[in-house]
Image (spheres, rainbow, N blue to C red):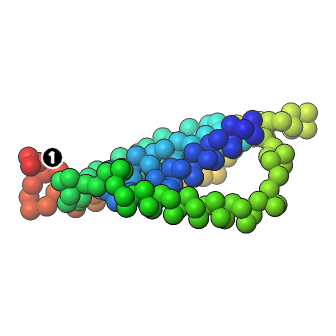
């Protein structure tokens, strides 16, 4: 299980480097989706399968708003691609910085200390994920409704901002 979580964490770093180094928002949105997917995989690897599914679905709704906003406000008809020299330089710089930080903190790293919630079956009465989901809906139900309303308000704000001079969001170029 440690190998899968390590693979997911490596994918998370690559996804975040892809977001930070892209000059065009089209490709950065793809990097955000990859980073969110492997982040939810890390959460599921530590025993939170339902919570990772909820976070993934909520994040996809937020990404829909972000992608609509970024594509309508991007003025480049021909954005820079991932093969340009500036993109390769940024990726190399960011991966070098992550490598230096990883080398600096490597001494206190122990892979055996990662413990999944369900590995202590003999000592627990409930599965960690089921009790967390129940607590999210009972104690955090109001915050869940507020967050859903904020996402809906953000969607309307983005659609109004991209309308521009009484033209709709879907307009002929």
Q: Position of residue 132 (x, y in %)?
A: 69, 44
Q: Residue at x 72, y 38 (%)?
A: 3
Picture layout, residue 126 above or below residue 156: above
Q: Position of residue 30 (x, y in %)?
A: 40, 46
Picture layout, residue 129 above or below residue 81: above
Q: As drawn, is 58 to the left or to the right of 48?
A: left
Residue farthest front in this picture:
85
Q: Quadrant of the N terminus?
A: top right
Picture layout, residue 171 above or below residue 106: above
Picture layout, residue 63 above or below residue 106: above
Q: Where is residue 61 in the image (x, y as percent from the top left)?
A: 41, 45
Residue farthest top in this picture:
121
- Residues packed near mark 1 inside 10 Å, few (<14), some (14 to 19) or many (20 plus): few
Q: How many marks?
A: 1
Q: What element carries label 1?
A: loop
Residue 152 seen by the camera: no
Q: Position of residue 4 (x, y in %)?
A: 68, 37
In this view of the protein, which residue sits in the foreground, 165 or 75? 75
Q: Which residue is drawn at 81% across and 61% down?
A: 107
Q: As drawn, is 81 to the left or to the right of 168?
A: right
- Which residue is labeled 1 in the image? 170
In this view of the protein, which residue sits in the foreground, 89 or 66? 89
Residue 167 seen by the camera: yes
Q: Residue at x 62, y 37 (%)?
A: 50
Q: Residue at x 69, y 44 (%)?
A: 6
């Amino acid at each position: 299980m440690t190998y899968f979580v390590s693979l997911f964490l490596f994918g998370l770093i690559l996804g975040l480097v892809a977001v930070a180094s892209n000059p065009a928002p089209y490709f950065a949105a793809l990097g955000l989706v990859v980073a969110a997917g492997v982040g939810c995989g890390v959460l599921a690897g530590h025993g939170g399968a339902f919570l990772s599914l909820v976070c993934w679905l909520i994040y996809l709704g937020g990404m829909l708003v972000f992608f609509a906003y970024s594509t309508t406000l991007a003025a480049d008809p021909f954005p820079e691609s991932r093969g340009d020299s500036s993109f390769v330089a940024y990726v190399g710089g960011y991966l070098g910085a992550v490598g230096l930080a990883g080398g600096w903190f490597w001494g206190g790293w122990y892979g055996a200390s990662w413990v999944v919630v369900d590995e202590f079956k003999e000592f627990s009465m409930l599965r960690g994920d089921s009790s967390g989901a129940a607590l999210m809906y009972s104690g955090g139900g109001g915050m869940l409704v507020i967050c859903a309303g904020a996402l809906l308000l953000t969607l309307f704000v983005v659609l109004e901002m991209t309308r521009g001079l009484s033209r709709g969001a879907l307009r002929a170029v």
